[in-house]
Amino acid sequence: MFQKVLIANRGEIALRVIRACRDLGIRTLAVYSDVDVDCLHVQMADETICIGEAPASESYLKIDRIISAAEVGDVDAIHPGYGFLAENAHFADVCENCNIKFIGPSAAAMRAMGDKAKARECARKAGVPVVPGSEGLLDNEQEALRAAKKLGYPVMIKAVAGGGGRGMRVAHNDVSLAQGFFTAKAEAEKAFSNPGLYLEKLIESPHHIEFQVLADERGRVVHVGERECSIQRRHQKLIEECPSPFVSADLRKRMGKAAVRLAQAVNYTNVGTIEFLVDGKGNFYFLEMNTRIQVEHPVTEEVYGVDLLKWQIRIAAGEKLGFGQDDLKPRGAAIECRINAENPDKDFMPSAGRIELFCPPGGCGVRVDSHAYSGYHLPPNYDSLLAKIIARGEDRDEALSRMRRALDECLVKGVHTTIPVAKRVLRDPNFCRGQYDLAFLPALLKNGRRDASL
């Protein structure tokens, strides 16, 4: 087992890694930007090193500074968390060249699945259904128009290196395709330094279902069930649950086998998430693979009793999985609400500043993953995620009841949050019945704006 791990991240995921390391008896080294000196992960780590100024480009994305910190701190491994360098194949290569274990998949697997066009091709070869789309990248508007004519509108313009909803536009006709093509291209260039685009046929009002996979370095691959991630705004997930109220036992079995098959096809190791779109008839299509731990991993942990962070570390240290597919059975249900520091009344504008009061909820069946505390100054430089509230129950109704209680208990003063939106979703009769898809939240927010204007 490793003696010391550097955490190349910040906030709640850095805390989550620190706690997993402590459970395993591993010392931790936290790196931080100057604006994060008071961040909780810096206070809890065994050792700390400042690696730069507030902009991520001057700190958390600086590979040379992170490697220098790792060498100064004499660490065995680096955990990238999610975001920043977590899916950067070059970073994984650098770690390997410096004899530092990268706690994640191989650089080759990241390259295969990080490029969406290559990932689609890998899925096809593995016999996993993919959304109909253009063949290869589109060099210009004329190629996009020809591809759209072949596929039929509506279509989705997607950045090949995209993520988090950036570089994506829906087009319903030639005019909106031309406009969206140039906008998505510019956005992709700015966000990912890769302007490559392709088209997919738009599957209207589908479910966004993702499967958690675990793979050791000896070839054993299992899936740890699915998560329902259809409560989204602008392709950003706000609420997730496990298991999905939409997925039947038969569909779970078929999708799980497809996820495992694809992970095996690219010789995947460590944790990963394979995402699918599922239409109302239960037809599923590969969307993408996230080659890292996910923000929403706690709902899987609560239902399946598997500590995914500890297994990330164990697998990287060479341990084999201590269980097989038949050992993984869901027990109960769990739901997660992301609490973002955003103002829903101002189109979800980020709300940075001093947190005057933060009183997280508690009680039976409630878990809170957060780096916030009263008096903490939330910087404007990073993601707006403030906390994740996870509620577990013996069944979905109990999990929902506990989540409503938790949201009512959670007190945050000094910054705006998305708690009011989460409360509204959990009160909606259709959501409570498990009858929702990707069209649900945009419609709910639109109706809310209409009601407010009356």
Image (tube, rainbow, N blue to C red):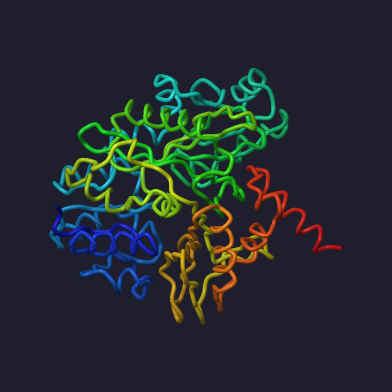
On the image, the x and y values in percent for residue 416 come to: 59, 71
Q: Residue at x 51, y 20 (%)?
A: 135
To which quarter of the image does residue 426 belong? bottom right
Q: Nearer the viewer, residue 277 or 366?
A: 366
Residue plotted at (39% across, 48% down): 304
Q: Give the percent coordinates (x, y) of residue 128.
A: 45, 24
**Up-down relation of residue 355 to residue 350 (above or below):** below
Q: Residue at x 37, y 39 (%)?
A: 213
Extreme residue in the front direction:
394
Q: Quadrant of residue 29?
A: bottom left
Q: Is residue 339 left or right of residue 86?
A: right
Question: Is 8 positioned to the left or the right of 240 in the image?
Answer: left
Q: Percent x, y for residue 96?
A: 18, 43
- Front residue (pair 156, 402): 402
| Residue 396: x %, y % from top left | 55, 52
For the C terminus, which image quadrant?
A: bottom right
In the displayed structure image, the side of residue 258 where residue 421 appears, left or right:
right
Question: For the view shown, which residue lies furthest in the right direction?
Answer: 454
In this view, 220 is above or below 66? above
Q: Residue at x 52, y 55 (%)?
A: 335
